[in-house]
Image (cartoon, rainbow, N blue to C red):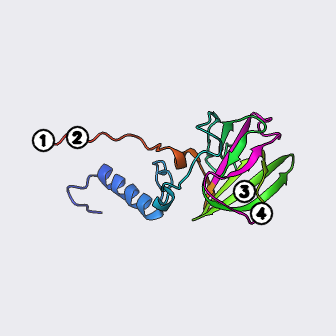
Amino acid sequence: MKTHPALKPAKLLALTVGVILFATGASTAQQPPPQIPSALRTADGWRWPLAGEPRIAEPFDKPAENWLPGHRGVDLAAAEGDKVFAPQRGQVTFASRIVDRPVMVIDHGNGFKTSLEPVTSEAEVGDWVAAGAHVGTVSTGAHCSSRCIHWGVRLNGEYIDPVLLIRDMRPSILLPLEQ
């Protein structure tokens, strides 16, 4: 096979691999964090489900594959009886026990769902709640032994780090000074 003089075998191999990766959608780079719709970054946007800014006792740890172990949310330091607030406006879609702890789920629309546990809900299934509304209290449960609450957020069924909804966690990018 005769190739163009500028395409040495190593360049040809790199070009071929690049085309295959592009065509199959494969990438060795990490996926960027999901984009949060700007409509949710308003004055009535996301907030912590506890008063103030709670300490993160256990951070989000997304598994490499959905079936692998990981931590699909964050544990926020709390005490039994602390008030729990809606982190965003939405509708309560679940408020009951799962195995050994009370769990509540709020559907925020746009593909976002929050789960909070162990939280005894003061809202009922079907209730609409405003962002920051008091919706329950930290209860006893096996997850944190009443020392924290677990806050999970799913976006279109995929767990995401809830802290991304509160804090801008993107890396800083230094731009050159104009000359």
First in sequence: mark 3 vs mark 4: 3
Which amino acid is tagged 3?
Val
Q: Is residue 168 magenta?
A: no
Which amino acid is tagged 4?
Val
Q: Can residue 69 be seen in this view?
A: no
Quickly name the residue at label 3.
105
Rounded to the nearest angstrom, the CA distance separating label 2 from label 3 is 45 Å
Asked whether the residues under the numbered discs 2 and 3 touch, taking CB atoms below 8 Å apart as contact, a structural biologist would say no
The residue nearer to you, when weighing 20 against 57, is: 57
Left or right of residue 32, residue 124 in this image? right
Residue farthest along the right direction in this orientation: 100
Q: Residue 179 carries which label?
A: 1
First in sequence: mark 4 vs mark 1: 4
Q: Quarter of the image containing the C terminus? A: top left
Rounded to the nearest angstrom, the CA distance separating label 1 from label 2 is 9 Å
Quickly name the residue at label 4.
125
Which region shows up in magenta?
126-153
Q: How crowded is mark 1: few (under 14 residues within 10 Å), some or many (20 or more)?
A: few
Quickly name the residue at label 2.
176
Left or right of residue 105, residue 168 in this image? left
Secondary structure category for the residue under label 4: loop
